[in-house]
Structure formats: C-alpha cells, structure tokens
C-alpha cells in the first residue's frame, strides 16, 4: 500500500481519489467480477448453448427436407409436358377457354399431394392467371394474390429471370371462415424442353405458414420462444400471428450483429422472463431466413439475482467507506468548488467582469479549471458585441424564414382547390398534372438540402418528367434506369434534377421531332462511387462551350444555360468535395451527355 501511495502525488486530486478508489473499490470489484463471470459462464454455457444449437440445427435440417418435398411437387408441375403444351397454347391464343379449364383441372389433381398447400397458381407469358384455390374454390380471384405485396407483373419478372426455385416470404393472405391465413410461396418458371429460353409462364405453390411452426415446434415449450426472420428483417413465422409481417431487425450479413439485434427486439417486446435468456440463431440458405430460439433462463436469472444481492451488499459497504474517506480528503476541494460555482453564478447573472480567485490551497485540477474559466470570461467580454450583432441578424433571418413559410402553404392549398375544381369538371388529366406539380413543389421546398434515398429522388423526378411529357404532347420520351443495389443509397435532394431540367428547357427548345431523354443510375464496380448519366438528343452544344464547362469556365449566355449548369455543379462540389466529378459530352445538333460521379460511403464508414 505504501508503494501505491508513492506512485501518486497527494497534491493532486487525481492522486488522492485514485488511491482511495483502488483501496476501497477496485480490489473488491475485481473479485466480484471474477466470481460472477465464472459462475455465469458454467451455468449458461454448459447447460444451454450446446443444446439450443443442436435443436436449431435439427430444425434447419427438417426445414430443408420439407422444402425439398414441396419443390418436388413444383418440379412435377413446371416440367409436365401436358401443362407446358396448354400454357403455350394459351400464350398463342388457341382454345384459351378449353386450355384454361384443362390446366385448372390438372392443378386441382395435384393439389392434395402434400398437406399445407392452399393454392397453386400459373401466370402465363400472355398475362393469363390460372389457379386452383383450396380456400375459396374460386376460378376468378385468388385468395392471396392481392396481399402478396407484389404486382402480377413483378411476380412474373422475379420468377422467370432464371431456372432457379424462388421463395416469396410469408405475408398476410386474408381471412376465410373467421380464420386468418398467412402464406409463403415457392415459384419457378415453366420450362419448354424444345426451347429452354422460351418464356412460357411461371408456377407458384402457396403454402400455409403453419408448416414452419410445425417444423420448429419440437423445440418449443414454456421456456422457449421460436420464430423465423427473412433477409429483409421481416417476421415470416412465429406463434403470435399478429406479429407476422412486422419488421423485427435491420438485416446484417454478420450473424453476431443480427443476434444482438434480436436481443434488443426481445428485450423490448417479449415477456420479462425471456429478456435475460440465451439467443441462438441459425440461417437456412434454402429458405433464406434465420431460425431464432430464445430460451428463458429462470434458473440463471435467480442465480444472477443472488449474485447481484451479494454485489450490492459489498458495494454498499464500499460506498460507505469511500464516502468517509473522501469526506475527510476533500474539504478544501469542496471549498474551492463552492467558490468556483459562486463565481459562475455571478457570471450567469450577466456580470462578465467576474473572475475566479485562486490561492496556494486550491487543488491542481480546480486551479486549471479556474484559469480556463477566467480565460473564457476574457474572451466572452470581447465577443459580446459581436454576439449582439449576430443575434440581430438571426432575428431578421427568422422573420424572413417565417414569412417564407407562408407562401408555400398558401400555394399548396391553392393547388388543392384547383385540383378539386378540375375533378368536378372531369378534367382528370389536368388534375393529375396539378397533383404532380404539388408533389414537386412540396418535395423541392421541404428541407431542400436533406439527404434522401436514390429511389425517392427518382420517384420525384418521374413526377417532374410527367409534367414535361404533357407539355410536349407525347413528343417527349423518357427512359430511367436505376440499378437495384443503389436504390437505398443516400444522396442530397434535387442533385441531378437541374441537369434534367437543362435538357428539357434548353436541349429540346429548338429541336423538332421526338425528344428523347435517358437517365441511368448505377454503382461503380467497387461500389465506392455512385454514377449518374443523363443523355438527350437535343440541340447539343459546341465543342468550345463543352470544353469550357469541363474546365470550370461558365460563359454568360442569353438563355442562362451555363448559369444553371454552374449552380448545379457547384452544389455537387459543395456537398461532396473534389472527389465528386461532373463531365459533359456533346455534339452540336445531335446530343448532350452529362456524367456525374459521386463518392459513396457505407453506413459503417459514415459512423466511423
């Protein structure tokens, strides 16, 4: 103990407090932590982890077997020559009614080959939908298609893109005979042996979510909660059907991160007896979802509560002893602190000339704080006048901002009134244009420099282009392509709209014929850069003007074309720095192409 005291200077508050803390808190805390760790380790690790992992692996294996059996049924359908011929005939328009009836009869014949199947549906390349629905027996409307979350065209494109079996996750299907049903779907394209690349149609087998609950039911019990979550973080199977379809976590490729997020979800929504339980997770590659087990640890909780009582008892004694020691050691400290607080209160009352008085008895740490406080007060006096001027400017700016908020509100209400006037007169085209204009104005005005997802920016751009297409009376064609992987990337609002507006306002102004605009958004090969390409077949620009813009020169022209380009490029540089690049390619009388490259950082990099 003597050596420890020699390591710290008693003239320093740090030395005094650390010495006392080591004597009264650190050593007992280390012993308590070691005891708690060893006890908890053997209770939790030896009794639960291996058993839960084994049960989950068995559930995953069973799930794979069951899915394989349902895939066999799907195989029998999409490889059936008779079904292929009938689908082909329907696509060709030959005896559609007869072939529909025959196809539905075949589907009904395969329906009872496996339990839990609720519907078998065929969507042809020509857009026909033929199905047998066990729930309703209807031939005109499926039980599930309206609630799957995807249009018929989207389902067809999703399943017909390759020769793999795809799973559409569990979603609410509907209520039948007072019972609520949730279904997931296995789908595959229909294959023609004669021409494997020929698009015929797709087939889906709709399966009751109850099948999933039966699979992991062997590990259920009073001390367990089991559920499944897909790669969108959505609950696809659980005992409480009210939770199906809810977003549970934000998905991560790291299973340890997902496990932590499941724990956060359990701590918020599960009964209290499960909040300290062991969470085990296995991922099913075949289904594309996590199987999660939460084991209630009542015995562990009781043991931990006992340990907590011991820790609290020891800490209580430690606090009492520490309080006594600190009280005897900090009389001078408290006196200095009280003087400092009193000085700060006088400064708070507006007495900027006040200063902290210090003497040789003032502890080192308080002495340092006092010097900094005095320096701060000196600086504060010098900046008071500047602050008054800044407050006056801010007051005027707030008044201007308040006035500016009135006009957009009035404009939105006025557009809404005009919209209803158009609807009353059955002028729906005008109504659609007014609605699109209102969305454009609201999007552009509200928090105009915020970051939004690329997908939302593109949706707003479509509203703008809808108005332009009406303006050009169908002589304006637009094509927008956005890679799926960049739809969720964040960019600043209205980032590339000025370039599109420049194409429409200046590129097409003197150009006759069909106006074509193409917008492409994709990620670089390394995914560290967002790329945007805006191409039009307008009047173009001269080589001289193009070179000037690319070199950072913006000549003044009567149509203000270069002014808009300069503002747009400057805004990009302001947000993203010199790593952002904008280049122009153009041929006079033929085309103009704007290439934008914006650096992209992942969420982890931004947090870092």
Image (spheres, rainbow, N blue to C red):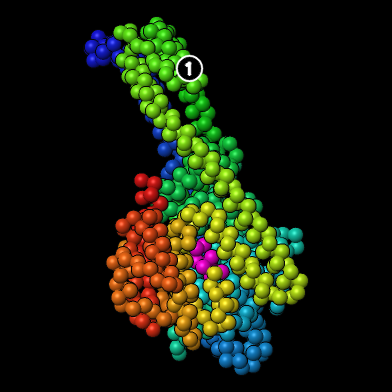
Please provide percent x and percent y for residue 100.
65, 85
Pick the front one: 285 or 14:
14
Q: Is residue 457 magenta?
A: yes
In the rendered structure, the answer to whether residue 1 lies left or right of residue 286 reads: left
Q: Residue at x 63, y 80 (%)?
A: 130
Pick the front one: 595 or 204:
595
Q: Is residue 403 above or below residue 482?
A: above
Pick the front one: 436 or 293:
436
Please provide percent x and percent y for residue 255.
41, 50
Q: Main secondary structure of the magenta part?
A: helix
Tell me the SS state at disc 1. helix
| Magenta residue span | 456-463
Pick the front one: 178 or 51:
178
Is any atom of residue 503 visible in this view? yes
Please provide percent x and percent y for residue 194.
45, 90
Q: Residue at x 34, y 72 (%)?
A: 584
Please provide percent x and percent y for residue 38.
38, 29
In the rendered structure, the answer to whether residue 119 lies left or right of residue 420 reads: left
For the N terminus, the quadrant is top left
Q: Residue at x 43, y 34 (%)?
A: 386
Q: Which residue is mark 1?
A: 346
Q: Quadrant of residue 587?
A: bottom left
Is any atom of residue 72 visible in this view? no
């Amino acid at each position: 103990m003597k050596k420890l005291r020699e390591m710290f200077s008693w003239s320093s508050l740090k030395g005094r407090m650390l010495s006392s803390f080591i004597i009264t808190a650190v050593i007992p805390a280390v012993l308590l932590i070691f005891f708690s760790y060893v006890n908890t380790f053997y209770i939790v690790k030896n009794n639960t982890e291996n058993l839960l992992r084994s049960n989950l692996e068995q559930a995953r294996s069973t799930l794979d077997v069951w899915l394989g059996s349902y895939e066999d049924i799907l195989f029998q359908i999409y490889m059936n020559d008779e079904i292929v011929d009938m689908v082909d005939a329907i696509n060709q328009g030959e005896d559609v009614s007869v072939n529909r009836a025959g196809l539905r009869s075949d589907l009904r014949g395969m329906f009872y080959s496996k339990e839990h199947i609720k519907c078998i549906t065929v969507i042809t390349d020509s857009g026909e939908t033929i199905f047998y629905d066990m729930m309703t027996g209807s031939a005109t409307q499926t039980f599930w298609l309206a609630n799957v979350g995807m249009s018929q065209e989207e389902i067809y494109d999703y399943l017909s893109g390759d020769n793999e079996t795809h799973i559409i996750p569990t979603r609410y299907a509907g209520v039948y005979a007072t019972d609520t049903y949730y279904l997931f779907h296995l789908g595959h394209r229909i294959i023609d042996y004669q021409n494997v690349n020929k698009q015929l149609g797709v087939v889906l087998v709709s399966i009751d979510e109850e099948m999933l609950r039966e699979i992991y039911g062997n590990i259920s019990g009073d001390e367990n909660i089991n559920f499944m979550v897909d790669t969108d973080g959505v609950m696809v199977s659980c005992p409480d059907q009210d939770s199906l379809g809810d977003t549970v976590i934000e998905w991560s490729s790291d299973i340890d991160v997902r496990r932590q997020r499941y724990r956060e979800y359990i701590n918020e929504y599960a009964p209290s007896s499960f909040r300290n339980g062991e969470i085990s997770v296995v991922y099913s590659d075949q289904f594309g979802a996590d199987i999660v087990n939460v084991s209630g640890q009542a015995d562990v909780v009781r043991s931990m509560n006992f340990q907590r009582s011991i820790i609290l008892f020891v800490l209580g004694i430690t606090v009492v002893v520490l309080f006594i020691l600190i009280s005897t050691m900090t009389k001078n400290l408290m006196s200095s602190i009280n003087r400092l607080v009193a000085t700060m209160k006088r400064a708070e009352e507006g007495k900027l000339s006040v200063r902290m008085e210090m003497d040789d008895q003032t502890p080192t740490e308080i002495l340092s704080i006092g010097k900094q406080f005095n320096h701060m007060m000196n600086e504060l006096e010098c900046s008071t006048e500047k602050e008054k001027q800044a407050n006056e400017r801010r007051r005027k700016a707030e008044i201007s901002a308040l006035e500016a908020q009135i006009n957009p509100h009035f404009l939105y209400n006025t557009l809404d009134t005009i919209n209803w006037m158009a609807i009353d007169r059955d002028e729906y085209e005008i109504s659609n244009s007014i609605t699109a204009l209102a969305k454009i104005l609201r999007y552009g005005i509200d928090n105009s420099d915020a970051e939004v997802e690329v997908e939302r920016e593109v949706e707003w751009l479509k509203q703008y282009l809808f108005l332009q297409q009406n303006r050009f009376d169908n002589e304006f064609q637009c094509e927008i392509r956005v890679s799926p992987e960049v739809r969720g990337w964040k960019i600043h609002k209205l980032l590339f709209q000025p370039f599109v507006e420049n194409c429409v306002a200046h590129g097409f102004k003197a150009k006759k014929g069909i106006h074509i605009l193409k917008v492409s958004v994709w990620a670089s090969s390394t995914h560290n850069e967002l790329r945007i390409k805006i191409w039009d077949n307008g009047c173009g620009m001269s080589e001289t003007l193009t070179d000037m813009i690319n070199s950072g020169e913006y000549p003044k022209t009567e149509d203000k074309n270069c002014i808009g380009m300069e503002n747009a490029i400057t805004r990009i540089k302001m947000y993203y720095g010199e790593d952002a690049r904008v280049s122009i390619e153009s041929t006079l009388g033929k085309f103009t192409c704007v290439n934008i490259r914006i650096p992209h950082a992942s969420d982890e990099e931004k947090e870092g």
